[in-house]
Structures are given as structure tokens and as C-alpha cells.
Image (cartoon, rainbow, N blue to C red):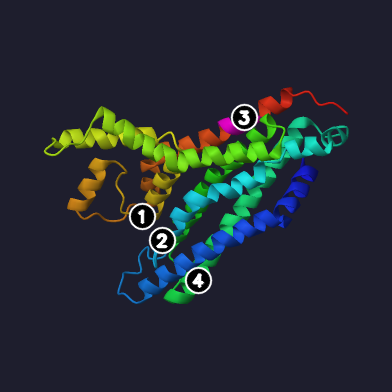
């Protein structure tokens, strides 16, 4: 499996499409972080957790780095996985590779681990560059609590992008044509990032419509239904989990918690308490990634592979 891993990792890091998307996220995210650091350096903001604002604060009409990763980050995972398997079948190299002393599970596991490692290298590199940019702009280093939260943000981001990698691998196994698997992956990405948000609002409007003079409990029910529908989206799970990690003052992600936070000033939570708040979201992301790859694994292990 190590031979497959190093070969696939070299292919990922040297591919033009990976480099293009890497620098696209780096440029846009770095520009957003630079503008945020510029605005923070000109204020008298307390240095406590100020580095976390580089990832959550947008400026100059650009989205925050967190928002950009949650929306465009899945494309990196998709491009690494949509042709991982079917391209090998189309070139006729699967039977040649598996005729060597390489088991099927070693082959697909090596491909998945190589993709996860490439995504981890990309995310960690961009985060380190943004942190170094903040060090240059702000003039003081991040504290230990900030470093631990940024490291947890990197881990969650890699798990999130790993779901899209496993989804791309799944479609690469199901569909023989690389164009079809790419279109299917992009369709799922658009559904979770755009259409599900509109669908959640539509369902909430049908069950608990908001009209002039409506009671507050109806409004709370409306938002609860909308949040429940969005829980099926890995994009919403990622945004909730990382927002609680990068904003230590969060006591909860529901409507009641946000209203309470707005009325009563709160102090930052320790990292352990923030993880407890978003533990269901973290488990959901890990479960989605594991289930998607497990389905890919089972389908591939049962597929017939011929030498011709």
C-alpha cells in the first residue's frame, strides 16, 4: 500500500488542476486575511484570539477564509477523486496493477489516504501562510489557545474535504466515464451548498409560516425546522463546527443560544467546551466521510475486473 500511496501522492501534488485550485484558494483566502489583518492592526482590539479573526472576518467585499473554504474547498476534494478509479479502467491499467502482489483493498486505501494527505498538506500550508501573514501584519505571535484552535480547524477542514474526496471516488467507481462522475460530483456539491438552503427555507415556511404579528414560538419553530433540514448537509455541519471553534464566545449554535449571547456578554470558552458544543456536528462529518468511503470500498471489492 505504501507504493500506491507515494505514487498517488506525487501525482496529486504534481497535477496542474490541483495546483490551480490550491493557488486560487491561497490568493483569495490570503487577500481576505490580509485585508482583515490590515483592519485589525489599525484598531485597539485585544490581542486575545485576534488571530482567529483572520479566518472568520471578511473585508473589501471578499468572503472570509472560512466561507471560501466551505464553498469552494469541496472542489479540491472532487478533482482529486472523480477520476481516481474510472480513469484506470479506461486506460486498462487496473488489471496490470492488480496482477502484481497488490491487493484490491491496498490499492483503493492507498488512493484514499494519498488524497487525504494531499488535502491535509494543502490546507495546512494555506493556514500557515495566513498565520505568517498575520504575524507580519499584527506584530505579535498567536497564543497557545489560538494555535490549538487553528490546529483543530485544520483537522476539521481535512475531514470535511475528505468527504468530498470519498464522494468523488464513489462516483468514479459507479460511472465509467470521467465526465459523468465529475458532473455528478458537482451536482451533489451544488445541491448541498445552494439548493438545500433554499429547500430548508421552503420546508420551514410550509410547516411554520412567518406572518406579520406571529408569536415568537412560531418563529423559533421555523428556525428549528430550517436548522434540522440543514443538518443533512455536510456544508452546514462544517460551518457550524468551525464557527464554534474559531469564535470562542459561542455558547451554542441554535437560535435560543444566539439570542442569549446577544443579550448577555460572555467570556471565551476553553477548547474542550467548544468541542463539546459541536460534538454532534463533528461526529456527523466523520460519519458521512466514513460511510461514503465504505460504500465505495464495498462496490469496488465486488466489481469484476477483467484482463481485457
Which comes sooner in the sequence, label 3 or label 4?
4
Q: Give the range drawn in magenta.
A: 291-296
- The residue to which callout 4 is attached is 133
Q: Answer left or right for 1 relative to 214.
A: right
Q: Which mark is residue 294?
A: 3
Q: Are the residues tagged 2 and 1 within 8 Å (C-beta)?
A: yes
Which corner quadrant of the image does residue 121 belong to?
Answer: bottom right
Which comes sooner in the sequence, label 2 or label 1?
2
Please rate how many residues cluster around mark 4, counting C-alpha atoms within 10 Å: few if below 14, some from 14 to 19, many from 20.
Answer: some
Expressed as whole percent of the image width and height from the top left, the position of residue 130 reads 51, 66
Expressed as whole percent of the image width and height from the top left, the position of residue 270 reads 36, 52
In the rendered image, the vertical position of residue 39 relative to residue 118, given as above or below: below
Expressed as whole percent of the image width and height from the top left, the position of residue 136 reads 48, 76
Q: Residue 247 carries which label?
A: 1
Q: Residue 52 carries which label?
A: 2
205 and 143: which is toward the camera = 205
Which comes sooner in the sequence, label 4 or label 2?
2
Amino acid at each position: 500500500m505504501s507504493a500506491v500511496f507515494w505514487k498517488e501522492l506525487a501525482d496529486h501534488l504534481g497535477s496542474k488542476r490541483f495546483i490551480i485550485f490550491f493557488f486560487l484558494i491561497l490568493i483569495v483566502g490570503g487577500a481576505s486575511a490580509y485585508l482583515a489583518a490590515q483592519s485589525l492592526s489599525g484598531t485597539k482590539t485585544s490581542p486575545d484570539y485576534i488571530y482567529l479573526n483572520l479566518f472568520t472576518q471578511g473585508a473589501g467585499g471578499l468572503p472570509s477564509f472560512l466561507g471560501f473554504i466551505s464553498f469552494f474547498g469541496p472542489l479540491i476534494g472532487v478533482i482529486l477523486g472523480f477520476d481516481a478509479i474510472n480513469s484506470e479502467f479506461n486506460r486498462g491499467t487496473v488489471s496490470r496493477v492488480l496482477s502484481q502482489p497488490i491487493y484490491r483493498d491496498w490499492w483503493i486505501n492507498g488512493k484514499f489516504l494519498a488524497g487525504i494527505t494531499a488535502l491535509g498538506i494543502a490546507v495546512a500550508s494555506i493556514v500557515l501562510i495566513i498565520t505568517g501573514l498575520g504575524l507580519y501584519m499584527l506584530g505579535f505571535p498567536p497564543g497557545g489557545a489560538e494555535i490549538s484552535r487553528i490546529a483543530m480547524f485544520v483537522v476539521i477542514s481535512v475531514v470535511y474535504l475528505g468527504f468530498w474526496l470519498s464522494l468523488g471516488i464513489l462516483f468514479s467507481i459507479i460511472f465509467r466515464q470521467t465526465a459523468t462522475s465529475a458532473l455528478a460530483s458537482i451536482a451533489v456539491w451544488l445541491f448541498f451548498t445552494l439548493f438545500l438552503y433554499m429547500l430548508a427555507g421552503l420546508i420551514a415556511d410550509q410547516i411554520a409560516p412567518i406572518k406579520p404579528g406571529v408569536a415568537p414560538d412560531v418563529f423559533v419553530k421555523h428556525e428549528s425546522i430550517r436548522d434540522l433540514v440543514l443538518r443533512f448537509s455536510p456544508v452546514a455541519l462544517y460551518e457550524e463546527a468551525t464557527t464554534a471553534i474559531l469564535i470562542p464566545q459561542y455558547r451554542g449554535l441554535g437560535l435560543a443560544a444566539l439570542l442569549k449571547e446577544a443579550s448577555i456578554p460572555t467570556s471565551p470558552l476553553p477548547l474542550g467546551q467548544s468541542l463539546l458544543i459541536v460534538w454532534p456536528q463533528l461526529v456527523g462529518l466523520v460519519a458521512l466521510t466514513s460511510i461514503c468511503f465504505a460504500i465505495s470500498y464495498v462496490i469496488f471489492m465486488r466489481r469484476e475486473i477483467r484482463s481485457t
